[in-house]
């Protein structure tokens, strides 16, 4: 029997399990998947919880609903990987030997990286929305908030779903308008980047949206600490931004298990070949999703495109061939922009987001880098697609490699 | 590719405004690049960071992140921002004649 172990049953691990399950002969293969948490969270839904659009129940399902029969499921904390011994050690000291390993342990926020962030104002006036707890706490706060200075803040890059903070800003503009108190809410967007987004053309266009919606952009801000007494954030070069409520994206890091395994970089992300998706220095370990150190966006859609590539390369490697498929960094993100509209961007390692139509050139139905109602429906549909197609490893009608067709230079 | 004259020599830059060819770099050029970044004079502390960055780049082929810089160069974050205001990792890489760090997406 050959042994495949998958670490992490989030978006990427679950998707990969289902793809490989259909292709591997269970008389020859034993497949094991490990996760510490029984509940699958639809993380893109966290964005909508603070505004009362979704609640907790809308974003959770039992993980076990998505595991095919005949797969060994272990619900346990992973302590470490011992790649030189080809084995994984769980928290209860159980040892799992493997022939092939797929690591999909994702990334998570660590507010303790910044002085004063997780302090006495945490979940009182300082919130995150990247966890279910943070999103729900913020939802409760907003319900009774009567206005003041709302500061939306990114601590440092990289973060998962790099457009989520912008979407949050757009939705806040919409939400407080609907509640009739927009004139009492002063919205600021504070980022370490030189503009609204990572890529120049999209950054300019999204920056215009911020301006139109009267959201003030403060770029190049590198946070040193949160001052809990005076309710302000302070940068390393002593710029101060006061707040009544701070919604921050804390530092994103790979899991501690990666650190314990000695396999991560300074942020516990795993050095990964950007084309083959194999862990650097190992010929039987693949890495997928947010756990990699790739310069692509950390997003569910990216994990999906990667899974097609990883699948082909896995099939090559187990048959003794060299990995033949190459990941191009393809990302595709719906950006919710408020008032029932959305913006769509599509890009890869080499090509920044460009205007045009998607996925059918000239037809769409989605418009790239433009604000339309159809793009908003795309975002709404995404949750349904996520539960019913994406996690189950069913093919989506979108190419895993980015296409230039339909894009305007 | 933008080309600019520095100290009487035509020098090529990449799209991010960093030196295209590592070999075009020398300490005199670094001083000029620093001026363009608003740093009138390079002190020993600046050079400590610049030299560390060049060493790291030769070793691993990428300029180090701020996190790595503060951990290994002996200069803490606060001082780094004083030496290279705004984005130290990017600025120091530029002056050291290295491409933009890959981490800075
Ligand atoms: C607010 C928000 C909005 C987003 N919006 C979008 C969007 O609109 N579109 C989009 O495409 N993406 C979006 N994303 C990003 C998307 O959710 C992630 O990129 C995706 O979930 C990554 O999948 P993953 O499998 O790599 O990680 P995850 O889905 O996070 O899974 C990691 C799994 O590993 C397990 N694990 C980790 N360490 C251990 C351990 N030591 N022991 C046991 N188990 C462990 C965890 O329990 C978890 O189940 C958003 C994310 C957030 C937070």
Image (cartoon, rainbow, N blue to C red):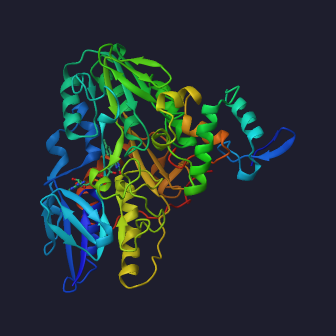
Please name the residue shown 24% across and 32% down the image.
A50
Image height of A176 relative to A271, above or below = above
A56 with respect to A210 (left or right): left
Total of numbered circles in the picture? 0
Q: Nearer the viewer, residue A210 or A310?
A: A310
Residue A137: percent from left, percent from top: 19, 30
Q: Nearer the viewer, residue A27 or A369?
A: A27
Please name the residue shown 21% across and 39% down the image.
A54
Residue A404: percent from left, percent from top: 56, 59
Q: Nearer the viewer, residue A85 or A291?
A: A85
Please name the residue shown 42% across and 28% down the image.
A223
Image quadrant where one finds the N terminus of chain A: bottom left
Q: Would you say residue A400 is visible in this rendering?
A: yes
Image height of A311 relative to A11, above or below = below
Residue B47 in which image quadrant: top right
Residue A206: percent from left, percent from top: 49, 36
Please name the residue shown 29% across and 51% down the image.
A255
Q: Would you say residue B100 is visible in this rendering?
A: no
Q: Nearer the viewer, residue A372 or A289?
A: A289
Furthest-right residue in this view: B8
Residue A86: percent from left, percent from top: 29, 72
Image height of A398 relative to B100, above or below = below
């Amino acid at each position: 029997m050959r042994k495949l172990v998958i670490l992490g049953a989030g978006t990427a691990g679950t998707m990969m399990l289902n793809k490989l399950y259909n292709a591997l002969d269970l008389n020859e293969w034993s497949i094991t998947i490990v996760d510490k948490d029984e509940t699958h969270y639809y993380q893109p839904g966290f964005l909508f919880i603070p505004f009362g659009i979704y609640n907790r129940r809308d974003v959770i399902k039992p993980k076990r609903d998505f595991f095919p029969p005949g797969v060994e499921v272990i619900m346990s904390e992973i302590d470490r990987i011992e790649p030189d011994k080809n084995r994984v050690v769980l928290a209860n000291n159980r040892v799992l030997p493997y022939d092939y390993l797929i690591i999909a342990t994702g990334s998570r926020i660590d507010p303790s990286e910044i002085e004063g962030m997780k302090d006495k104002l945490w979940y009182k006036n300082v919130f995150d929305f990247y966890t279910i707890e943070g999103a729900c706490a913020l939802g409760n706060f907003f319900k009774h908030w009567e206005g003041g200075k709302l500061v939306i803040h990114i601590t440092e890059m990289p973060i998962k779903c790099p457009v989520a903070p912008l979407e949050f800003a757009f939705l806040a503009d919409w939400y407080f308008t609907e509640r009739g108190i927009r004139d009492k809410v002063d919205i600021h967007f504070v980022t370490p980047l030189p503009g609204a987004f990572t890529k120049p053309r999209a950054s300019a266009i999204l920056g215009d949206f911020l301006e139109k919606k009267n959201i003030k952009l403060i770029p190049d801000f590198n946070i040193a600490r949160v001052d809990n007494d005076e309710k302000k954030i302070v940068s390393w070069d002593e710029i101060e931004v006061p707040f009544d409520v701070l919604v921050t994206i804390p530092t994103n890091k790979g899991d501690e298990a990666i650190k314990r395994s000695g396999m991560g970089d300074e942020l516990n992300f795993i050095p990964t070949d950007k084309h083959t998706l194999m862990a650097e220095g190992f010929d039987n370990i693949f890495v997928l999703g947010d756990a990699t150190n790739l310069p692509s966006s950390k997003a569910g859609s990216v994990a999906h495109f990667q899974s097609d590539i990883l699948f082909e390369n896995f099939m090559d490697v187990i048959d003794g061939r060299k990995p033949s498929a190459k990941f191009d960094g393809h990302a595709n993100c719906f950006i919710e922009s408020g008032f029932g509209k959305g913006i769509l961007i599509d890009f890869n390692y080499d090509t920044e987001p460009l205007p045009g139509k998607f996925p059918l050139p000239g037809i769409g139905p989605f418009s790239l880098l433009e604000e339309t109602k159809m793009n908003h429906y795309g975002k709404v549909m995404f949750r349904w697609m996520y539960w019913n197609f994406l996690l189950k490893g069913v093919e989506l009608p979108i190419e895993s490699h980015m296409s230039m067709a339909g894009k305007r230079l | 590719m933008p080309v600019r004259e520095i100290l009487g020599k035509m020098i090529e830059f990449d799209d991010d405004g960093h030196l295209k060819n590592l070999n075009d770099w020398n300490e005199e050029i670094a001083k000029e690049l620093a001026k363009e970044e608003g740093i009138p004079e390079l002190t020993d502390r600046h050079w400590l960071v610049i030299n560390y960055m060049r060493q790291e780049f030769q070793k691993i082929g990428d300029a180090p992140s701020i996190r790595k810089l503060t951990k290994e160069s002996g200069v803490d974050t606060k001082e780094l921002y004083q030496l290279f205001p705004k984005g130290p990792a990017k600025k120091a890489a530029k002056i050291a004649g290295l491409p933009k760090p890959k981490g800075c997406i």
